Image (spheres, grey):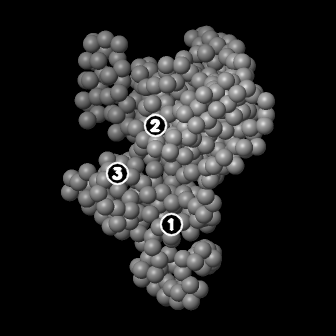
Amino acid sequence: MGDDRLIGELLVERGVASRAAVEEASLAAHAAGQRLCTRLLASRACDERDLAAALATRHGLPGVDLSRTVVDLEALQAVPRSVAEGDLILPLSGEGGRLHLAVDSPSRAEQVVAEVRFVTGREVSIYVSVLGALQEAISQAYDAAARGAAVWRGAAAGPGLARIEAVLPAREAQEPLLVDESDVEPFAAEPMGDVEIVDSADEGEVVATVQVLPGPARVLVVDDEPAIRLLAQRALQHKGYAVEVAGDGQEALDKVRARPPDLLLLDAMLPKVHGFEVARRVRSDPASRQVPIVIMTAVYRGWRFAEDARQSYGAEDYVEKPFRVDDLLRRVELVLEATASRDARPPSEAGPGLEQGRALLAAGRLEEAIAALEEALRLDAFSAEAHWLLGKALTSRGDAFRAMTQLERAVELRPGHFAALKALAATYLEKGFRNKAAETLERAVHAAPDEPTKAALRKELLKLL
């Protein structure tokens, strides 16, 4: 009940409910064996959005208002109904290559989330929700899926495409991000050449003619919110950087492919292509893998998300919104300084350790090969070939679960890596993950180099179906 007391205090502090209403609901919840938020929601004393914000603040994670969320029911395939009901987790979306899950208690769900991450081979983002709303949503969503429906809509969701109604911690939501000249004025005094900025009252955009310092670093700012794009663009230009902007993930990828920037300032939540998926594709492409990435987010908060962004997507830094402009500029400058010599490294190789590991593996010297390949990945964590070879070496040593992790990473970085796909399918099958083996073998069929190989793989696939 300690959590309920803390949640109650948060609700009172923020004016969501009176102390008398919270105390009455708390007594009723205790008598009925309920949680406070569930009781307040059932009695309509509080809106679910406010309760989700209080839970988010308590746990330091994004919350989700399930009443306004629309779930693509295809996501439910990742978690069987018995697991969802027994462990109180609801798949909300598979957007951005990640599995987004609603849970009632992040600490209680930690083990099952780890299992879901392992079995599905996908990174997981969690959102805290009101227990009563979660139980009802699980039942309704799986019932809808059984009827063949494409989406489940919360009671207050209304029409529209699938979406997660994420709720930020209340203390953050009350801090406005102000976009005005005062944010960037302190930097205008620095010597940087002539700058002229003209605001268009009709369009709300900025037309800027900038005479920048010789050879300025090029920064691509990607955000679907015009106000934040404008703020970052102005601040960076005032600092002397050459700035391009993009409003969605696909536009960002097109611009990176056309001309890789010196730094990518990337929002995590983007239309068309999710920000994390943009980061993964940039890192997977040898032509752009050396581009440093700074991720901005208002949803994925806390050090765990920051570590995921660094380890799984290669982000050099992670900035939470709302941010101070001077802090953002400092981080951009530090990242550019830290990665200034990156171009000197081979763009698609993990140092000499890769070829050394390959040779040692061919000679059957497994332990030495593993050590060399681990060193190669320390130098370049985004080498699909190094992950594949390490997975192969670990398989030969009998370390199937570690091998599985490396092979999964290889095909994540290079989806058409035929040898890694075939090895991963065999490893899944060896460990009893028959459905995952079939799914991976089907991907291997599409990546196979010739028709005879495709035909042989189809025969293997039929045995699994």
Residue under pointer 3: 162
* Residue wearing tag 1: 52
Which quadrant does the N terminus fall into?
bottom right
Asked if residue 153 can be seen in this view, the reply is yes
Q: Nearer the viewer, mark 2 or mark 3?
A: 2
Residue 182, image x and y in percent?
70, 49
Q: Residues within 10 Å of mark 1 (few under 14, many from 20)?
A: many
**Which badge, 2 or 3, is on the more N-terminal residue?**
3
The residue located at (30%, 64%) in the rendering is 140
Residue found at x 32% / y 47%: 74
Viewer can see residue 139:
no
The secondary element bearing badge 2 is classed as: loop
Looking at the picture, which amino acid does disc 2 mark? Asp
> Contact (CB < 8 A) between labels 3 and 1?
no
Q: Is residue 351 left or right of residue 436?
A: right
**Label 2, label 3: how far apart the Cα atoms are:** 18 Å
Mark 2 lies on residue: 248
Quadrant in the picture for residue 267: top right
Packing grade of label 2 (10 A; few <14, some 14-19, many >=20) is many
Using the image as rendered, state which of residue 465 and residue 344 is in the foreground. 344
Amino acid tagged 3: Ala
